[in-house]
Image (spheres, rainbow, N blue to C red):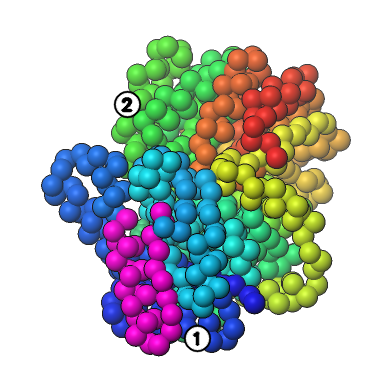
Amino acid sequence: MSLIVQKFGGTSVADPEKIRAAARRAIRAQNQGHRVVMVVSAMGKQTDELLRLATAVSEKPPAREMDMLLSTGEQTSVALVAMAIDDLGAKAVSLTGGQFGMKTDNSYSKARIRSIDTSRIESLLDEGNIVVAAGFQGIDDDLNITTLGRGGSDTTAVALAAVLGADACEIHTDVDGVYTTDPRLLPEARRVDVISYDEMLELASLGAGVMHSRSIEFAKKFRVPIHVRSSFSDREGTMIVSPAESESSPVSGAALTKDEARITVLGVPDVPGMSQAIFSAIAAQKVAVDMVVQNVGAQGKADVSFTVPRQELQVTLDAIEAIMETIGASGVTHDAEVAKVSVVGLAMARQKSVAARMFRALADAGVNIHMITTSEIKISALVPRDHAADALRAVHESFQLDQRPADAKTWAEIQAGSSPHADMDDVVTRLQNDALEALTLTDIAILEGQARVTLDGVPDRVGVAAEIFDEIGRAGIFVDLIVQGYDGQDGSTSVSFTIGQSDLEPAMKVAQSICQTHAMRDVRGADGITKLSVSGIGLRSHTQVGTVLFEQLASAKINVEMIATSELQVNVVIDSARGDDAKNCLRAAFADALS
Ligand code: ASP
Ligand code: MG
């Protein structure tokens, strides 16, 4: 008999009528012959209300008591759902996290799942019950109640689906699926039938609020197909699975992060360990840094630019001010009026000129690009905030995201055409692990034979990036990483990109001619460089990965020339002579996490 997990979010159980509607859905699934486990969130805004109460009685509520309090929201809703099911004539039992054997570590308010004992749920199912499991909560080894972090019920649902070997994991929510971009920002956004885990992870980290990021990491690691659908209609929603909807469309979704700030640390000595010093000082303030660009150094100095959420600009500036002298940097500049527009797509990793197409769309819409970072499946551009909406529209239109790609497949079509996953053995082994959410690295690898081209003194105005990458594309050159950051010398920018070694000569020709046309300061090329990539699941939510990586490279005295990070990979460009050293020291440092 098939087993399905149905998760209902807060808006789907916000009042008695909705609770009865959720109960009816579960009963209907049971009547269709499924074993049904429901995972339920707290009603409506209950969690916010509890948080408000906590801060009303205490300035600094103890973390343990906070989790004790917040878990009651879900305890209330599961009991009510079970009562509704009973009233509708079916059998149900509600269970708290502790009661169904959800074991976590002891980090209150952001606990990670260690293991789930399925025996109690299974015997209740055997007796014909619908099991109504509380989302978001677990217990630690000392039986303290813990919570998984805001939005954590999604993670409970996916985790239960994984350990129970469920046939489906349905997320019933107030939207009817995943869109190519936020439909509130852009009405022409399209609901997609299928999106890949990797794309969803990138979009979630860019603020596409559909699902808790950790739930997608969990789903990817354990191959749980997720069906996001509306709890108010019977329409099929979006499947989040391994493959993308289309094999050929380079971009599947676009996102806008509106309130960003750019900071540039000027004249940082170009020696190993400097970025590490800067970023550990910021990490100590618990600020998440994004879009890191370190210009390729000249005269022994480099400029390091990055973005932070706008409300964290001041703390970040203070943290940098405090270490300026120690690291010997010459100054700091910032811009609080910027927004980040990004495109994400699994297929872009294999295609030429995707970045050029995005930059062209922005140029044609009159949008200036201040900064660029790319990774294997994502391109982000920092633009002036007052052009953010135009930027998103231009990019969405340019990649025709409002239209279903001609080769798009539905989940049924994908399943019909695919053989069972080769890596199911990995999944089985991972399920035996007693730290289900532990960091999992799939590879630490180097790619040798790379070259880099850097343009200095690139004017910070509309259309320049588009021109550079249009020309490079016309020369038939495949560009891997691109970064554009601030150039401290004169407020211009500096653009670097990596290519295969054999393309260095033609790429230099193109770059030199552009340099002349725009009176840029300099073009520099280098070969003999290596890209070092650490790939895995949960790189962003396990924030230590970046820290350990930079510490390791710094203590091995390996200089980092370029950095590109994503949800799936941390990439750094280093000198080829040190490629093997770097790989070996990282493999040793991360031995526990390598699967
Ligand atoms: N009730 C919790 C929250 O509001 C968990 C959840 O809804 O997923 O964050
Ligand atoms: Mg919620």
Q: Name the image quarter holding residue 468.
A: top right
Disc 2 crowd rating (10 Å Cα; few below 14, some 14-19, many 20+) is: few
Is the residue 367 above or below the residue 292 in the image? below
Q: Which mark is residue 318?
A: 2
Using the rendered view, name the quadrant where residue 75 is placed: bottom left
Q: CA distance from mark 1 to mark 2?
A: 57 Å
- Please state if 404 lies on the left or on the right of 286 as rendered: right
Relative to 74, does residue 568 appear above or below in the rendering? above
User: For the residue marked with disc 2, what is the amino acid?
Assistant: Asp
Q: Secondary structure at mark 1?
A: helix
The quadrant of the rendering that contains the C terminus is: top right
* Mark linked to residue 28: 1
Q: Is residue 110 visible?
A: no
Residue 547 location, x and y as percent? 53, 28
Q: Answer whether residue 84 is magenta in the image.
A: yes
Residue type pointed to by label 1: Arg
Labelled pair 1, 2 in contact (Cβ < 8 Å): no
Asked whether residue 309 is drawn in magenta, I would say no
- Point out which mark residue 292 bears: none
Residue beneath the point at 59% across and 18% down: 554
User: Depth-wise, is mark 1 or mark 2 nearer the camera?
Assistant: 1
Q: Where does the image place residue 225, in percent across and percent down from the top left?
A: 63, 65
First in residue order: circle 1 vs circle 2 = 1
Q: Which residues are magenta?
A: 71-98
In the image, 181 versus 235, the foreground residue is: 235
Q: Nearer the viewer, residue 315 or 157?
A: 157
